[in-house]
Amino acid sequence: MIGYVEAPISWALIRGMARRAGVDVPRAVAEGWLSRENLAVLVDRCQSGGCTASCINLLGKPQGTHPHPPPAFCAIRAELEALAPVQK
């Protein structure tokens, strides 16, 4: 089980933004695309990124069924984009 009890809000936001971008973070870790150490860095950056309210607001809106790139304000945008599947 992958989770961050010390940062539950950031962990939930990471999973939500990743899901929105078409990324399954626990699967990426399980399959070796993302190390647990790198995931811990992402959790820390998300937690200190200052965009929690914006993320919550965005994730609270209907998204449709197609993946969406992370917004410009996302503290872990580059990493999520790198993990996102290529859209054709």
Image: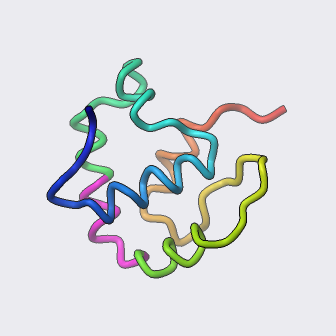
Looking at the image, residue 24 sits to the left or right of residue 39; the answer is right
Residue 26 horizontal/vertical position (percent): 39, 33
Q: Nearer the viewer, residue 85 or 72?
A: 85
Looking at the image, is 5 positioned above or below residue 30? below
Q: In which quarter of the image is residue 64?
A: bottom right
Q: Nearer the viewer, residue 59 or 51?
A: 59
Q: Quadrant of residue 38?
A: top left
Looking at the image, is 49 positioned above or below residue 17? below
Residue 14 horizontal/vertical position (percent): 42, 54
Task: Look at 37% across and 30% down and name the residue there.
Answer: 34
Q: Main secondary structure of the magenta part?
A: helix
Looking at the image, residue 82 sits to the left or right of residue 46; the answer is right
Residue 52 horizontal/vertical position (percent): 40, 75
Q: Give the range drawn in magenta.
A: 43-51
Q: Is 37 a magenta residue?
A: no
Task: Look at 33% across and 62% down and name the residue there.
Answer: 10
Q: Which colour scheme is used?
A: rainbow
Query: Residue placed farthest to the left in the image?
Result: 6
**Which part of the image, by quadrant, shows the C terminus?**
top right
Query: Residue placed farthest to the right in the image?
Result: 88
